[in-house]
Amino acid sequence: VSARLTIDPHFTVGPINRRLFGSFVEHLGRCVYDGLYEPGHPTADAEGFRQDVIDLVTELGVSTIRYPGGNFVSGFRWEDSVGPVAERPRRLDLAWHSTETNEVGLHEFSNWLDKVGSELMLAINLGTRGTMEALDLLEYANLPGGTALSQQRIDNGRTDAFGVKMWCLGNEMDGPWQLGHRSAEDYGKLASQTAKAMRQLDPSVELVACGSSSAHMPTFGEWERVVLTHSYDDVDYISCHAYYQEKNGDLGSFLASAVDMDHFIDSVTATADHVKAVLGSSKTIDISFDEWNVWYLDRYEDVDRIEGIDNWPVAPRLLEDAYSVADAVVFGNLLISLLRHADRVTSASLAQLVNVIAPIMTEPGGPAWKQTTYFPFALTSRLATGDALDVKLESDDYETAVYGTVPLVDAVATHDASTGSTSVFLVNRSQHEPATVTIDIAALGAVAVREAQTLTDTDTSAKNVLGDEERVGLVATESVVVGDGGVTIILPPVSWTALSLG
Ligand code: AHR
């Protein structure tokens, strides 16, 4: 397999917004309870947060964290989650058939975010609630003082406003599974009305309208068009959500999942720009890709799903996917796709962060460890700074059952003028052949390799699991050779690589 690409700092796609490296914490399964929060754990701090998890999240390099759902939010009363913990009600979580204790709420989560150095992105309930409750939460969170709700926040121990900038106007309102699921017309009007009202209270908020839950929804495309037609002037972002899994043993198609993500982003961008043209607007809507990952959804449907009127567990084990090397290669490729669209995807959230389809796993009373997917995220978040570059890639290709003919090698580059560093992220989708990649770096002048690391394994199904938590890790990329104006690098089959030059 061979591929060529060219790196020229003039071929910019756009600046990389740090919010591209966001994540998502939902009150779901063991993400919060027995995940980031476990008061009895040996590493727990005074507030009950696991220090080992704080350390792993900090090292992961997560910018913005979307909270508290997800499907959960469409049945959530935010008022339950503030005030004295002992007085907070236990509630049914209909989305995940669980009991929510409300032990961790807005204040506690915000404190945790300070510990990991991340920004809060709040989702409001537009499924079973409406504009008034959204305004109440915004007033509670962002008004400095002088009203009943802002005073309530102060009385609850938080003098300064939370100052939340990013707000999601509901969650996956196109999905029939969503509590309060609506038509695009109804949701578009509600999103517009709620956004207008929220801006009347706080003009500085940045608002995300719900796009499609996946590019494979029957209403995909039309949903975005109708929702934006109603809300274009009122919102800043339209969301995308996408999850990928290997189906029917078809690893070749699975490895090409980023082709689908590229198509998804291009389609939503085109639809938003269509509405812009029809409305004669000068404003451009960006994408908040606020749920993306590999997720073996079939396993949830077939094995994990909880049922029964008398069965509403607290923090059950749900969606605890263990990720393989192949999963992490696809995952790294999804990050490449997001970076390639940095001009329009200016916010993204890896769904999710701890235990639930997560890069970090924990055991109660036991260890916290890195899944395979942790490595591409941490490295990309650390190395992808400055501008994303178009690399003019030429690659051998292969046939897939799902996506037709696709390139065997995929890549993106970034260049940071302030540090003089250039990074390249590459995947080899070939299952059996190494790929020799030639990179033209004449435009960079004299550079040396600062860092080169690869995620690969002769067993592409290898995972990091309890008892064998460090089975998979990064390896130094020995094959990089920097010559006169060019770099050559050999990518092992089914691998993801990050290369930093400077
Ligand atoms: O991330 C898991 C779930 O996936 C979220 O709750 C929902 O928004 C999506 O369907």
Image (cartoon, rainbow, N blue to C red):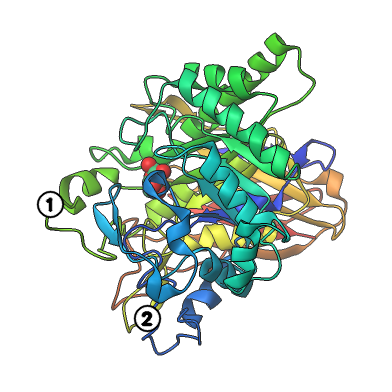
Q: Is residue 342 above or below residue 218?
A: below
Of tags 1 and 2, the one toward the viewer is 1
Image point (35%, 48%), residue name: 295
* Residue drawn 55% across the image and 72% down it: 112
Q: Amino acid at mark 1?
A: Ile
Looking at the rendered structure, the secondary structure element under dot 2 is loop
- The image shows residue 185, relative to residue 481, as above or below, that is above
At label 2, counting other C-alpha atoms closer than 10 Å, the crowd grade (few under 14, some 14-19, many 20 or more) is some
Image quadrant assignment for residue 29: bottom left
> Mark 2 highlights which residue?
367
Which of 468/14 is in front? 14
In the picture shown, does residue 409 fall above or below 299?
above
Residue 477 lies left or right of residue 85; in this view the side is: right
Question: In the drawing, does residue 467 fall left or right of residue 66?
Answer: left
Across and down, in percent, residue 495 comes to 47, 53
Asked whether residue 224 appears in the rendered view, the answer is yes
Q: Nearer the viewer, residue 90 or 67?
A: 90
Q: Tag 1's secondary structure? A: loop
Residue at 52% over, 47% down: 123
Q: Position of residue 83 (x, y in %)?
A: 49, 69
User: Residue at left 39%, top 64%?
Assistant: 31
Residue assigned mark 1? 309
The quadrant of the image that shows the C terminus is bottom right
Question: Is 62 or 328 nearer to us in this picture?
Answer: 62
Residue 5 quadrant: top right
